Image: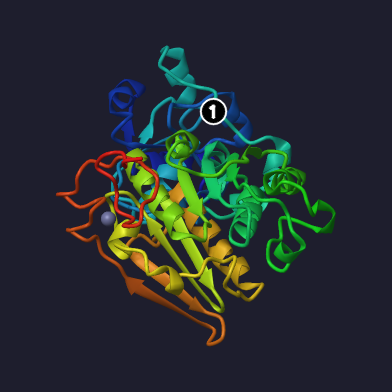
Amino acid sequence: MKTPRDLLKEARELTRHVVPADVQPRLDEVAVLDVREPDEYEQGALPGAIHLPRGNLEFSVEGRIPDKSTPVVVYCATGVRSVFAAKTMGDMGYTDVVEMVGGFNRWKDEGRPWRAPETLTADQRNRYQRHLLVSEVGETGQLKLLHSKVLLLGAGGLGSPAALYLTAAGVGTIGIIDMDVVDASNLQRQILHSMDRIGERKVDSAKKTLTALNPDVDVVTYDVRLGADNVLDIIDGYDLIVDGTDNFPTRYLVNDASLLKRIPVVHGSIFRFEGQVTVFDPYNGPCYRCLIPEPPPAELAPSCAEAGVLGVLPGIVGSIQAVEAIKMVLGIGDPLVGRLLAYDALEETFRTFKVRRDPKCPACGPDAPPIVIAEYDDLCMPHTAPPLK
Ligand SMILES: [Zn+2]
């Protein structure tokens, strides 16, 4: 029978070792894995360390470090658990794992840089428990969400479900722009609002609903019309825009402004029984003008105020927008960049279509003139100069 000492000796012989002095200059090049318990980690850790307690290693490490050829430095407090962790990772197929001799204690004693990592509170740990259980989100991802800022254009049919789910997911700052008041005819689909809010500003009603759902979230409201005069100021500082607007002029305006500020837009639209979602990631994928260079004639482009829509349809499309927004913030999965998802509620089908950047795009093409944000004109083209009054 083997004693713990035998096991350690055996693991040590099968593991490669480095001293803190060799790790410090390579901090930017390697994945640093901290396998201590949460209470130890919270007291202080190496800058940028990935935290994964030894007990969760086998089942979680592939989610946190998917590429098994990644150079990894593993450490614990003194260099015992890290030896076992490094050996296990070798057994799991990781090819470049080293263990840091002396662990965090030696690192700290030698006066090397460390930080007290930001962590979730006990309440947050409870609230986002189901996110923490998904390794692609985890505590790091949840903190990312809590630090993210998402701007919703419209507190209507698409904005309602998107806002509710993004708030529930813990997106730390949610901006909402809408200049309407709640009307009884909205309640068939705009689930942010309710009977007792009729006549209230939509942004105020939205803020009440969202704040009641999750106090972690800062809801910033803009009770204005989005126009050329304010669009750049409003979108500035947001990581992402969720577009739930229902008219062409605003979509073109938002497109041009988001290209200038390089802010991705999660676009959604609905009509009768059909919905569409795509993600415009500036200069990494097509933009709205690549897709729709010119607006259709007015008689063929009814706005939502005029067109009918099945009440639950925006619930589905807006929820997909929320999914895409969360994926973009976390940097996980394949967002709908360069793909258009079309949903047909009557057929109950989802189809995706490839969409490409248009080399002749007047907004994001290589020969496009510099974008100047100005009010929509009949041509709906990006202006190279402010329009004549
Ligand atoms: Zn374009």
Occupied quadrant, residue 190:
bottom right
Looking at the image, the residue that sits furthest to the right is 196
Disc 1 designates what residue? 117
Residue depicted at 26% across the width and 64% down the height: 356
> Is 150 on the left-hand or right-hand side of 18?
right
Q: Secondary structure at mark 1?
A: loop
9 in relation to 248, above or below: above
Q: Which of these two is toward me, 201 or 310? A: 201
Residue depicted at 30% across the width and 40% down the height: 372
Crowd class of label 1 (few under 14; some 14 to 19; many from 20; radius 10 Å):
some
Q: Which of these two is toward me, 92 or 119? A: 119
| Residue kind at label 1, given as amino acid type | Pro
- Horizontal and vertical percent position of residue 17: 33, 33
- Horizontal and vertical percent position of residue 234: 49, 36
Looking at the image, the residue that sits furthest to the front is 389
Question: Ligand 1 is in which quadrant of the figure?
Answer: bottom left
Number of numbered discs visible in the structure rendering:
1
- Horizontal and vertical percent position of residue 199: 78, 51
Q: Is residue 228 visible?
A: yes
Residue depicted at 42% across the width and 39% down the height: 9
- For the C terminus, the quadrant is top left
